[in-house]
Image: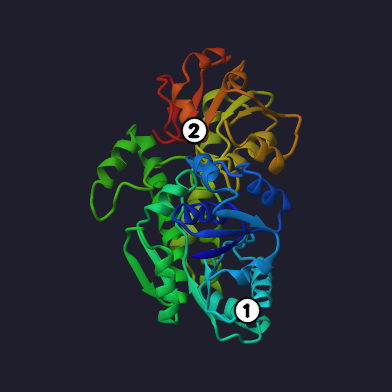
């Protein structure tokens, strides 16, 4: 099929590449001319395992990019993957969705064949019905040949290609069976349970899924607090818990909390939605509160070990929200770094992938050093905080001998080195 994908961010570009791998002809549309040029020139703009090889196979062939929306009319399916950031209160910003819908509608006003518009962006329940469909139809002159579908994504950063090609489920929210059948054909060849429902339910499934994952993580961290006091290994405890088939072992790793571009944002948005409906989502608020407190816990433990943090050199290994990615949005390393800076500590940070993004996010600060290796960050450090589960950290050993004092605290369990302590174990 001929498919256009709006938005060349993490979800959009990963989805486009996988669709090209499945045999579809994909046009990637993005207003960022640098991204467009990178895609058409064969320069991989995304850090993701397996991405480069697949990208080389399809860039310039089944996958092409443009900044012009007029190519939409030549495709059968258009998938919206633009970002929907939220405020600190959780109010989602749908302006990019609305703008994309106006451009889509304008370019479909004279189309004659049936065209399917698929919403893959995470949006509040009711957005497709109340904003997306009316906006498209208004700008396309009520073209009757347009169908609408909600198809939420469940991609994990660091596992995006694998998750797309081997999903736990495919959720298809449609009013029109014809549109649903067409979207099923897009996924032809992928073996997965397919849930057919209405658009609003599909939108809610995405929010509920991420909120539940966030709840599991915060629950594990609460158990970790208790285990730390009792001298128990929370990983061993949660391994026993996770083998219960009603619970499953996933998202039970205690640590410094959840971050990234999805879980914090979607949890805030769901809380905002509930409160606007007159509900008080106590459990969801507690999940967010527990997560926000995790950075305080590791700072308190650090103070307990080395005392006043003023003018102490603290090595931070891992500043992405998780290992294997360069994503720093809502990374738990950010509040830790800000608190250390507030206490006048000196920070030597290292991450194999995310340093450049962190420089953009935080900027150049005298007390914050961006190091080119773990050894450089550990040199003469008074303590070390490991905040992301980057695989290369597992091989560190002799590098810790460079420290002034071997105070090593893990926020994620990754080190094989024996002389360390976990935030909850």
Real-space CA distance between mark 2 and mark 1, rounded to the nearest whole angstrom: 43 Å
Q: Quadrant of residue 370?
A: top right
Q: Quadrant of residue 187?
A: bottom left
Q: Nearer the viewer, residue 363 or 27?
A: 27
Residue 136: mark: 1
- Whether the residues at callouts 2 and 1 have beta carbons within 8 Å, the answer is no
User: Which residue is situated farthest in the left direction here?
Assistant: 244
Mark 2 or 1 closer to N-term? 1
Q: Is residue 387 above or below residue 399?
A: below
The image's colouring method is: rainbow
Q: How far across and down, in percent of the image, does residue 159 sit?
A: 45, 45
Q: Nearer the viewer, mark 2 or mark 1?
A: 1
The residue positioned 51% from the left and 43% from the top of the image is 51
Q: Residue 391 at what x, y percent from top left? A: 46, 30
Q: Quick check: 256 left or right of 89?
A: left
Judging depth in this view, the residue of 256 and 117 nearest the camera is 117
Residue 359 position within the rendered picture, expressed as x and y whole percent measured from the top left: 70, 37
Regarding residue 406, the answer to whether it shows in the image is yes
Mark sitting on residue 390: 2
SS label for mark 2: loop
Q: Is residue 57 left or right of residue 42?
A: left
Instruction: Report crowding for label 2: few under 14, some 14 to 19, many 20 or more residues within 10 A (C-alpha).
Output: many
Task: Residue at 48%, 50% (x, y): give it.
Answer: 290
> Is disc 1 placed on a helix, strand or loop?
helix
**Of residues 67 and 168, which is closer to you in this image?**
67
Q: Position of residue 405 (x, y in %)?
A: 55, 16
The residue under the point 62% across, 69% down is: 72
Q: Quadrant of the C terminus?
A: top left
């Amino acid at each position: 099929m001929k498919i256009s994908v709006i938005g060349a961010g993490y979800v959009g570009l990963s989805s486009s590449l996988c669709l090209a791998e499945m045999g579809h002809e994909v046009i990637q549309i993005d207003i960022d001319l640098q991204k467009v040029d990178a895609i058409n020139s064969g320069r991989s703009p995304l850090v993701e395992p397996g991405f480069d090889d697949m990208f080389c196979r399809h860039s310039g062939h089944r996958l092409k990019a443009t900044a012009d929306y007029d190519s939409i009319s030549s495709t059968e399916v258009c998938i919206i993957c633009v970002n929907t950031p939220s405020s600190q209160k959780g109010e989602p910003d749908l302006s990019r969705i609305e703008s994309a819908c106006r451009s889509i509608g304008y370019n479909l006003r004279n189309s004659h064949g049936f065209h399917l518009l698929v919403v893959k962006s995470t949006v509040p329940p009711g957005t497709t019905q109340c904003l997306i469909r009316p906006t498209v139809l208004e700008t396309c002159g009520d073209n009757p040949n347009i169908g609408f579908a909600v198809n939420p994504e469940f991609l994990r950063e660091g596992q995006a290609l694998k998750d797309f090609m081997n999903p736990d489920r495919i959720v298809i929210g449609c009013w029109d069976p014809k549109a649903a059948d067409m979207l099923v054909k897009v996924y032809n060849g992928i073996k997965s349970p397919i849930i057919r429902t209405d658009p609003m339910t599909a939108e809610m499934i995405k929010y509920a899924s991420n909120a539940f994952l966030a709840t599991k993580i915060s629950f594990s961290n609460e158990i970790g607090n208790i285990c730390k006091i009792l001298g128990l290994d929370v990983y061993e405890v949660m391994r026993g818990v996770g083998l219960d088939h009603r619970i499953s072992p996933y998202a039970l790793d205690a640590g410094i909390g959840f971050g990234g571009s999805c879980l914090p944002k979607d949890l805030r948005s769901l809380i905002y939605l509930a409160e606007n409906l007159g509900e008080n989502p106590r459990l969801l608020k507690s999940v967010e509160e527990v997560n926000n407190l995790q950075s305080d816990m590791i700072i308190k433990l650090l103070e307990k070990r080395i005392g006043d943090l003023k003018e102490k050199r603290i090595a931070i290994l891992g500043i992405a929200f998780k290992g294997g990615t360069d994503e720093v949005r809502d990374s738990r390393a950010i509040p830790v770094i800000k608190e250390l800076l507030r206490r006048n500590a000196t920070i030597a940070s290292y991450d194999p992938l995310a340093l450049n993004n962190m420089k953009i996010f935080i900027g150049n600060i005298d007390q914050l050093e961006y190091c080119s290796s773990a050894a450089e960050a550990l040199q003469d450090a008074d303590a070390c905080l490991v905040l992301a589960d980057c695989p290369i950290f597992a091989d560190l050993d002799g590098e810790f001998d460079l420290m002034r004092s071997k105070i090593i605290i893990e926020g994620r369990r990754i080190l094989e080195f024996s002389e360390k302590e976990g935030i909850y174990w």
